[in-house]
Image (spheres, coloured by chain):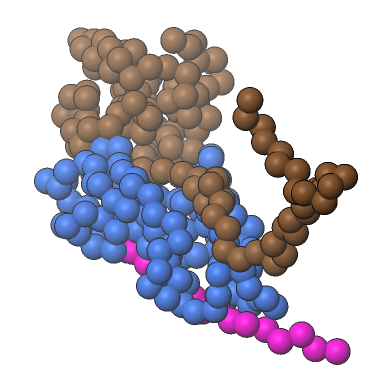
Chain colours: A brown, B blue
């Protein structure tokens, strides 16, 4: 859970008041650090609960609606949100379903793996000469048998 | 339907975490080696995929590097769309040993599906001077 600063809340409301189309609101909110902070600092469950609580209010001021859109955007772009369906009821907002549609194209998955192919190297060629054998002889000229076994 | 929309092979790729965009640095078009086996310190194979909402969210794949049809590296991986319509899959290879000249192919093959691949020539360069 995080508390948005006054500046952040004002930026969200300004985005809502200036936006004249769903896409302009989507793009404007997406750029805000407040929305990025909501996304990275809050769990998905917390954001969904916050969205439900905000949109359930009987009296919806501009501030309440703007905040609800910010929550919705953070939900749609949340790393824990791995389903095609939005976990929140976006139809509670006038442009909610458009937001879902835009998010489908704007937000992309990402995977990265590293393969260390020399983890178990195999010998391809060798230039080493074969080891030379040395035979030790005793005083009588007979070869000495050397063994590590008792 | 699952579709590979873009593939690129580069020395390395950079992901901008804030804007979530990729950049490919030093795109590989050919590999020149004075002698063999040649060592390729790193390579990055970036693929971009798209599918429909009704398709499954994950796909079993095999990432491979082959030289003229002979596999040098193969690894089973999973392509995960993470609930999104599009996804990017970046495979970083570290330390490839190329035994000879030929056609070097980096591929990501989806089981019972499409294959993303890039092929570049590995050429022997003569020493001069």
Observer-nearest of A53 and B33: B33
Query: Quick check: is B84 in the magenta stretch?
Result: no
| Quarter containing the C terminus of chain B | bottom right
Most extreme residue toward the left is B54
Report x, y in % for residue A105: 30, 49
Of A9 and B60, which appears nearest the observer?
B60
Image point 74% across, 56% down: which residue? A133
Q: Is residue B78 above or below residue A56?
A: below
Span colored in magenta: B116-129
Residue B70 position in % (x across, y down): 40, 69
Instruction: Please give left or right for residue A24 compared with residue B19 in the image.
Output: left
Number of marks in the rendered image = 0
- The foreground one among B77 and B82 is B77
Image quadrant assignment for residue B56: top left
Q: Residue furthest bottom?
A: B129
Judged by its main secondary structure, the magenta piece is strand
For the point 46% across and 77% down, the residue is B103
Residue at figure coordinates x 49%, y 79% from the top left: B102
Residue A91 position within the rendered picture, expressed as x and y whole percent measured from the top left: 16, 29
- Residue that appears at 30% across and 15% down: A45
Say if A108 sits above or below A48 in the image: below
Residue A38 location, quadrant? top left
Q: Is residue B129 left or right of residue B59?
A: right
A64 horizontally vs B43: left or right: left
| x and y, in percent, of residue B107 in the image | 38, 63
Q: Is residue A84 left or right of residue B37?
A: left
């Amino acid at each position: 859970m995080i508390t948005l600063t006054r500046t952040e809340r004002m930026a969200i409301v300004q985005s809502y008041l200036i936006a004249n189309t769903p896409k302009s609101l989507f793009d404007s909110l997406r750029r805000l650090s407040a929305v990025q902070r909501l996304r990275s600092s809050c769990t998905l469950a917390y954001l969904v609960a916050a969205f439900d609580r905000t949109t359930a209010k009987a009296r919806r001021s501009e501030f309440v609606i703007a905040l609800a859109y910010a929550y919705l955007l953070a939900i749609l772009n949340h790393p824990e949100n791995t389903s095609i369906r939005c976990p929140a009821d976006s139809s509670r907002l006038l442009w909610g379903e458009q937001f879902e549609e835009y998010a489908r194209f704007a937000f992309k998955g990402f995977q990265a793996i590293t393969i260390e192919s020399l983890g178990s190297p195999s010998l391809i060629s060798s230039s080493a000469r074969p080891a030379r054998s040395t035979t030790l002889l005793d005083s009588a000229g007979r070869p000495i048998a050397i063994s590590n076994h008792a | 339907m699952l579709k590979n929309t873009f593939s690129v092979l580069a020395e390395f790729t950079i992901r901008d975490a804030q804007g979530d965009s990729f950049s490919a640095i030093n795109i590989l078009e050919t590999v020149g080696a004075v002698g063999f086996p040649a060592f390729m310190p790193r390579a990055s194979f970036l693929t971009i995929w798209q599918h429909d909402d009704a398709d499954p969210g994950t796909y079993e794949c095999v990432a491979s590097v082959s030289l003229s049809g002979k596999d040098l590296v193969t690894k089973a991986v999973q392509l995960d769309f993470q609930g999104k319509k599009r996804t990017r899959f970046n495979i970083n290879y570290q330390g490839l040993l190329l035994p000879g000249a030929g056609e070097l192919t980096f591929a990501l093959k989806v089981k019972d599906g499409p294959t993303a691949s890039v092929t570049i020539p590995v050429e022997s360069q003569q020493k001069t001077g």
